[in-house]
Amino acid sequence: MKRRAVELETITLTGLPDEAVPAYEAALQSVARSVGYFREEPGETWRLEAVREQGADPAALAGALALAALISGHTAEPDRAPVEAEGWLARTVEAFPEQEIGGRFLIRPTHLPNPRDYARMVLRLDAGLAFGSGEHNSTRGCLMAFERVAARKPRRIADIGSGSGILAMAAAKQLKRPVLATDIEPWSVRIAGDNAVMNGLRNLVHARLADGWRHRRVAAEGPYDLIFANILARPLCAMAKDLAGALAPGGTAILAGLLGTQARWVMSAHRHAGLVLERRLNVGPWTTLVLRRRG
């Protein structure tokens, strides 16, 4: 007997200004299977679209949107519409092709053949996992920044807010070093662990549930030579002092999840914490910052 397809719905938020996009994107990622963002021309507002099971935990959705409104100072009302599961999966697969990032990495979805590639380092990911798939420009910016930082051969590495674990896996695979990958979402921790196993990195990528720098596991394994923090501008600023304290002298932090309009704010918070800007990468409207601790 054919299994009945899961009924899905699309949640659409329109009219979002630049500064509200990261907060609402994070809110939708916490309650949905897939999140996409769209803007027709530079200077226009943004539209976010999320797909999830119909009627799934309306209280969680309302709470996530309320928190995003509080963080961003902008209120957005969701529009909801049904979508066929098969159509969504087909669109997701079609929209997630093989991706070359920078000069080193290749993101290959699991629905494609996996021949050996001698020119690039291949990371395998499921097309159904929109967050941390490499498609988002903040993730791409982190991988591009890491290519240069990897030449310093950092030994102690942490990926804070690791999502799918793509940055932790890239570091572990290239440097052959253990990486601590933490997230506040249990589902993300499980997915990062599964991805590490799929990519042959079970013994190098250690996915853990942890909230911030004061978690005992995070504190015990520092100080770090390299820290990835691909989260949001506001928590990056709030944690600037803790991040700086967790870096070893001469250590590097790769920060992302912020729009270009938020970069000065994030840089200022980390300068006050004693870090210096080494490099800034702009990929579309998103910015990646490479910062170093003196020493």
Image: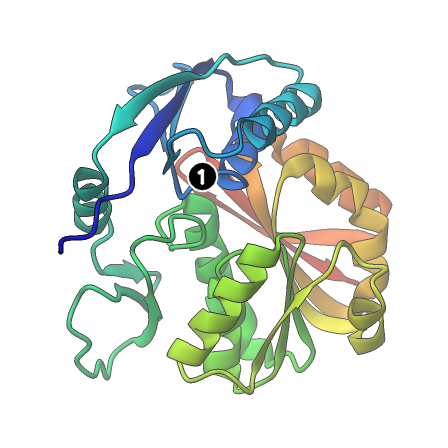
Say whether residue 268 is left or right of residue 149.
right
Q: Residue at x 75, y 40 (%)?
A: 237
Q: Quadrant of the C terminus?
A: bottom right
Q: Quadrant of residue 20?
A: top right
* Residue 110 visible in the displayed image: yes
Q: Quadrant of residue 66?
A: top right
Relative vertical location of residue 229 with respect to residue 27 in this rendering, above or below: below
Relative vertical location of residue 63 with respect to residue 52 in this rendering, above or below: above
Could you say where residue 234 lies in the image, as x and y percent from the top left? Answer: 71, 35
Q: Quadrant of the N terminus?
A: bottom left
Say whether residue 35 is left or right of residue 214.
left
Relative vertical location of residue 143 with respect to residue 194 in this rendering, above or below: above
Total marks placed: 1
Could you say where residue 231 lies in the image, as x and y percent from the top left? Answer: 61, 46
Q: Quadrant of residue 247?
A: bottom right
Q: Which residue is mark 1?
A: 32
Name the foreground residue: 128 vs 102. 128
Q: Residues within 10 Å of mark 1 (few under 14, many from 20)?
A: some
Amino acid type, callout 1: Ala
Relative vertical location of residue 233 with respect to residue 293 in this rendering, above or below: above
Name the foreground residue: 49 vs 145. 49
Say whether residue 184 is left or right of residue 116.
right
